[in-house]
Amino acid sequence: MQSSIRLGLWRAAVHSLKTRRPLPCRFRSVHDGAPAGLADAESIFALSSGHGRCGVAVVRASGPASSAVLRSMVGLTSSLPAPRTALLRSITDPQSKEVLDRGLVLWFPAPHSFTGEDCVEFHIHGGPAVISAVLQALGSVPGMRPAEAGEFTRRAFQAGKLGLTEVEGLADLIHAETEAQRRQALRQMSGELGRLYQDWTHRLKVCLAHVEAFIDFSEDELIEDGVLDQVDRLVSNLQAEIERHLKDERRGERLRSGVQVVIAGATNAGKSSLLNTLCQRPAAIVSPIAGTTRDVVETALDVGGFPVLLSDTAGLRDSPDLVEREGVRRARERVEQADLTLVVVDCSHLPTDVQETAAFLQGHLRSVLPPQEQTETVYPADRFLLVLNKTDLLPQEQKQKLDVDLRQFSGLPPVCLISCQTTDGLHDFLAVLHSSVKNLCGNPLAGAPTLTQARHRAHLQQCVVALAQYQQYRDIDLALAAEGVRLALTCLGRITGRVGAEEILDIIFKDFCIGK
């Protein structure tokens, strides 16, 4: 099925290359060596609704040849249809005039379209043969070629329809698998994060304009007193805001990529059984033989709308077996990288005395945790959970007493008593797990928008360093201090995709009366 669609795209591309005439300079593509931009764009087309059999497929075309495509494939002889109005027409091959399908056609004239160019959409039946035929017909129209991955969105960015952070939000929305990911991506796509960065950018432009004006014109006494003091306050406030923005404990990035949850513990504690219970399938082999799991077994979960990457690891013990030792090493490595560690204990091995039980669990925690965390006396609830498995092997009274007694100890992380065999206690465990994961990700709709991309964090960290350069050189060399502000502005521009020297000049001439 997909090979049929790919064949249609290939034939369309070949036909397009064979038949298209050299285009005027303003329509040449980046592939012909011309600079990128809407004025240079060829017309492109692609299947926008994804591959696979479906009731309706959407094929989109964008560029200066879109109106010609519309006329030649739906038989329009007079004016184009009303913008953004569905029109039911027979869709034909522009060469053979054969009817390919009957579907809806929508016309989006520039600049009121997703890409800012003339666009047309064909809503056709979603069978592979229909899609392949329509794509091949589009490729036969002079000036049309198959779109590259992301090219429609790139054109929307170049036309100013979307900022770079909005583009990233759109990509995250397309790939969102959980409810929380959808909310975060939709918030970013709405432009809220971009507006925050644009506000910081504008304030930095004002700072740079004032400093540059002071350097160039202060000797002529055309600059008001206190200009640099105002810049000092703006820079200090902005640096503090960015530093607060960076101190988000990576919640947005964690929500975007998934919370790393690692199941760790001794051999035969029921780690693989817990993995299989949570993902509701036999993802890992379960055996009474100690050391069955020797490599990391991963599975993706949706825990109450939050994405989780759950990893089962080898049982932690000393072993003469080289393969098992490598599995233990990988297990400890995963624990070090984990956002949340589920420490699984076979509760049938616990001491009967409650004091001894608490000491046993604390010692067990220290044996599982990375060396740098083994001295901790308080274990955060969103970093560690103690899972006492195999409660079905305990008498009911002993299980209830254990549950009550362990709640009295403050030196332990949250304790959950479960049985993977009978699923007893699983509901309560999932509630605790959901609470921990939610704390790690935060509420994507509450408070200021959070960082979602590692590249944003890197550029903002560089921005803070650059602003510190301004403060370092402010009283030593104002030109070097100004360079710090310029570097900070460049760092923000790399996030938003927009920064230009002309805007700095605009602010200089707007804010100051220079050369009356």
Image: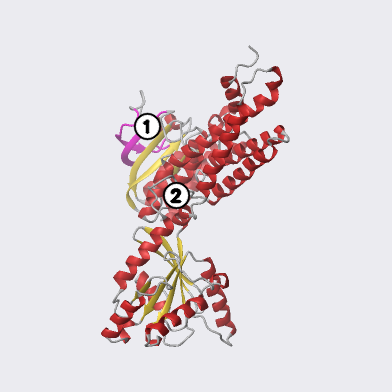
Indicate the secondary structure of the residue bearing disc 1. strand
Residue at left 66%, top 25%? 214
For the view shown, which residue lies furthest in the right direction? 476
Q: How many marks?
A: 2
Q: Which quarter of the figure is the C terminus placed in?
A: top right
Q: Position of residue 41 (x, y in %)?
A: 54, 33
Q: State whether residue 108 is above or below residue 516.
A: below
Q: Is residue 220 magenta?
A: no
Neighbour tally class for label 2: few under 14, some 14-19, many 20 plus, Cα within 10 Å: many
Q: Which mark is residue 107?
A: 1
- Amino acid tagged 1: Trp
Front-most of 165 and 51? 165
Which segment did they paint magenta?
A: 83-109
Residue that appears at 36% across and 70% down: 278
For the point 43% across and 84% down, the residue is 268
Residue position marked by numbered label 2 in the rendering? 172
Q: From what the image shows, is residue 112 above or below residue 248?
A: above
- The amino acid type found where label 2 is placed reads Asp
Q: Is residue 399 visible?
A: yes
Residue 37 seen in the current view: no
User: Pointer 1 and pointer 2: residues touching (CB < 8 Å)?
Assistant: no
Label 2 residue SS: helix
The answer to which quarter of the image holds residue 436 is bottom left
| Percent of width and height locating residue 375 | 54, 73
Q: CA distance from mark 1 to mark 2?
A: 27 Å
Residue 216 in the image: state x and y as whole percent.
Answer: 70, 23
Work out whether residue 98 or residue 177 is closer to the camera in this orientation and state it: 177
Which image quarter holds the N terminus?
Answer: bottom left
Picture quadrant where residue 433 is located: bottom left
